[in-house]
Image (tube, grey):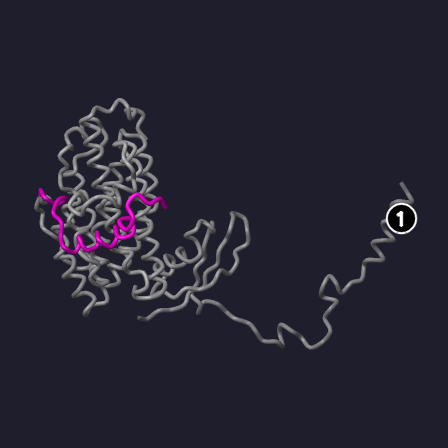
Amino acid sequence: MSSAAPPEALLGDVTRDALAELLLATADDEFVIGFWDSEWTGIAPMLEEDVAMSSIAQDEIGHARALYELLAETTHDDPDRIAFGRPADAFRHAALMNHPRTDWAFTVARRFLYEHADAVRLEALARSSHERLAGLAGKMRREESYHRMHADAWLQRLAEAGGEARKRLTAALQRLWPDADAVFTPLSGEPELLASGVLAEPLAALHGRWRARVRPTLERLSLPVGGDGAPPPDGRTRRTDDFRWLHGEFTMVAGSEEGATW
Amino acid sequence: MTDSVWEVFRQEDEGDAMTHAGSVRAPDAELALHYAREFYGRRQESTRLWVVPREAINELDDPDWLKPPFDRSYKRPGGYLIKHKLEAAKARAEESP
C-alpha cells in the first residue's frame, strides 16, 4: 500500500470525478458479469459446477457491492441506488458484459477473457495511491485468483474435448475478443487518475499486459487470439437489448416499490 | 461426462485431525479441488482440505477382521476392572502423607 495516499478531502473535484468514473466502470463490470453468471444457478452442466458457478457469481456481486460503497462515499450517494436505481444506459461496464449467458462454452470464454483482464487491472489498483481502493483491490485479488484458476481449468477442458465443445469455444472467443478489449477503453478522467497516482499505470499499458498474459494459453490450446487493435472508444457506453433485458430483471424487485427499505 | 468420485477430508483448525467431510463428483483433480472448496470450504469452515480419488482408498469392512467372534473385551481399556484398585490406591495415599 502506498504511503502517499491523498486523504479523501484533499482530492480535487476533477480527480474525485475521475475516481468515481474508475470505480463505476470497475464495479459495473463485476456487477453485470455476476448477474449473467448467476443465471446458471440450477442449470449448470453438473451439480458441483452449479454450486461453484453460483458461488463465483455471488463473489463478483460482492466485489461490486464493495466498490459501489466506496463510490457512494466518494460521491455522497447511496450504493443501492447506484446498483438498482440507474437506467440501463447509465451503466458503464465493458461491452464484453453486454452479451447474454448463451451456452456454457460462451460463458467459459467470457470468464477466461474477463478474469485475466480483471487480474491485470486489480494488480494496478492494488498499487493505487488511494489507500482504500488499494486495500480493496488487494482483498479482491485473493478471491479472483481462484476464479481465474476455475476459468483456466474449464477453458482447457473444453478446448481439449474437441468436437462441439471446441467449436463453440472457438466461436465464442472470436466473437468476444473485440468486446474484451473494451475493459481497457480509456476513461475520460484518465489523465487525472494517472497524475494523482490513483491509477498506477495507463489502461493502454494494462491492455498490452492482458494480451501478453492470455496469448500463451490460447496458443498452447490452438485457440484463436484476437487482433492487436486499440480498445473501442465506445467500449463502455454501448448498450444492447440483451443487457436491457438483464437490467429489467435485476432492477425488478427494487423497482417494484420505490423507497422501500430492506 | 466422465466424472469420478473424490472423497474430501477437512481440517477445521490448524492442528485438528482431518475428518471425512463428504464427497464430490468431478472430471479431474483440479476441478475436484474447486468443488471441494465450494462444498466444504467456502464459508471459512476449513483450514485445509484433502481431496482423494475414491479408487485410491483401500477399504476393509470384513467382519471377520473387524468384529472377531470371540470375546476380546480385554483389548479395550474397559476390559480391565481397575476401579477398585484405584480406590484402594487413593485410600493408601491419604493414609500415608
Q: Is residue B82 magenta?
A: no
Residue at horizontal 13 percent and vertical 41 percent from the top? A185
Farthest residue, direction right: B95
> Would you identify the image quadrant in which residue A14 lies?
top left
**Residue on which disc 1 sits:** B92
Say which of B28 and A23 sits in front: A23
**Residue A37 in the figure: left or right of residue B58:** left
Q: How many marks?
A: 1
Say which of B18 and A47 sits in front: A47
The chain carrying label 1 is B
Q: Say above or below: A249 vs A183.
A: below
Say which of B26 and A36 sits in front: A36
Q: What segment carries the magenta color? A: A233-262
Position of the N terminus of chain B, as image quadrant, is bottom left
Residue at horizontal 17 percent and vertical 45 percent from the top? A183
Counting from the top left corner in percent of width and height, residue A75 is at 25, 32
